Amino acid sequence: MRTARALAALSVLAGAAAAPASSWPGEVRGAVAVLEVFNRALPHHVPEAAPPRFALLEDGQVFVGGTRSLSVGRLGSKELKDLERRFAEVRRLPGLAGTITLGPGERRHRIRLFKGGRPLDLTINGDPARAVPERRPLAGLLQDLEQFTHPTLRPYAPESYALSAREGSLRGGCRRWTAASPPIAETVFAPVGIPAAVADGWPTGATPASVCVGNRTYVVTLRPLLPGEQP
């Protein structure tokens, strides 16, 4: 039993070392669709720690994310129905399960659709602009959601963040983690939710920070959480 637990812990630690933030963010209560885009804007960025590029909730709230922050707006009933129709059309495409490839290219997306059937969770590789013909309806949806804008969008102030870390260092010096809780070392194994006040003054989203704890140095990320989202 101890050996199994040790191996499990090592496995989680290895995954955390590869990506400081949780590779797959937690579930979002009341979500219709969530799109994440895993592109590295700068060499030191951690794309998995960026907020969702697009998230739609059942009440019509829509969130649009960039590298570090989120905006929030609200769709009208017709706009909501039009998007739900497109989600339903994508669901009807053959061969949508697990990891799929659109075509050539290094881009990586994850889209989750929660309404209109069983939850659909897809990891998508390839550039949507270079999709093969049978994948173009999905590619078109990804492109439109990735570039989504709406006149009601306003800056969103998250109530909490997902704190995650791995041992490592960045160029330049490191900062001290002064919050009483949680200890940075505990977030290597799994991200921990923290109130927004604790994250005040720290880089957020895909931009990491270097943190010193004793004689160890960690690369730390703070991913903005949507309402009701767990890390």
Image (cartoon, grey):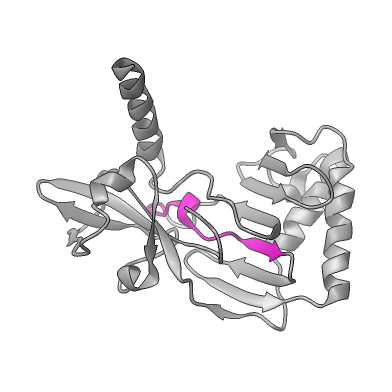
Residue 229 included in the magenta stretch of the image: no
Q: Nearer the viewer, residue 197 or 215?
A: 197
Q: Nearer the viewer, residue 170 or 49?
A: 49
The N terminus appears in which quarter of the rendering?
Answer: top left
What residue is at 79 percent from the left and 55 percent from the top? 141
Residue 169 at least partly seen? no
The stretch in magenta equals 43-57
When asked about the image quadrant of residue 118, the answer is top right
Residue 85 x, y percent position in the rendering:
89, 58
When asked about the image quadrant of residue 34, the answer is bottom right
What residue is at 38 percent from the left and 39 percent from the top? 16
Q: Is residue 180 above or below residue 117?
A: below
Q: Nearer the viewer, residue 203 or 59?
A: 59
Instruction: Tell which residue pokes out farthest to the front in this image.
Output: 1
Q: Is residue 129 left or right of residue 84?
A: left
Residue 13 x, y percent position in the rendering:
34, 34
What residue is at 19 percent from the left and 48 percent from the top? 217
Residue 48 x, y percent position in the rendering:
49, 50
Instruction: Tell which residue pokes out farthest to the left in this image.
Output: 215
Q: Is residue 165 left or right of residue 35?
A: left
**Count of labels in the image:** 0
Residue 96 at least partly seen? yes
Residue 48 included in the magenta stretch of the image: yes
Q: Nearer the viewer, residue 152 or 147?
A: 152
Q: Is residue 136 left or right of residue 10?
A: right
Q: Is residue 200 above or below residue 2?
A: below
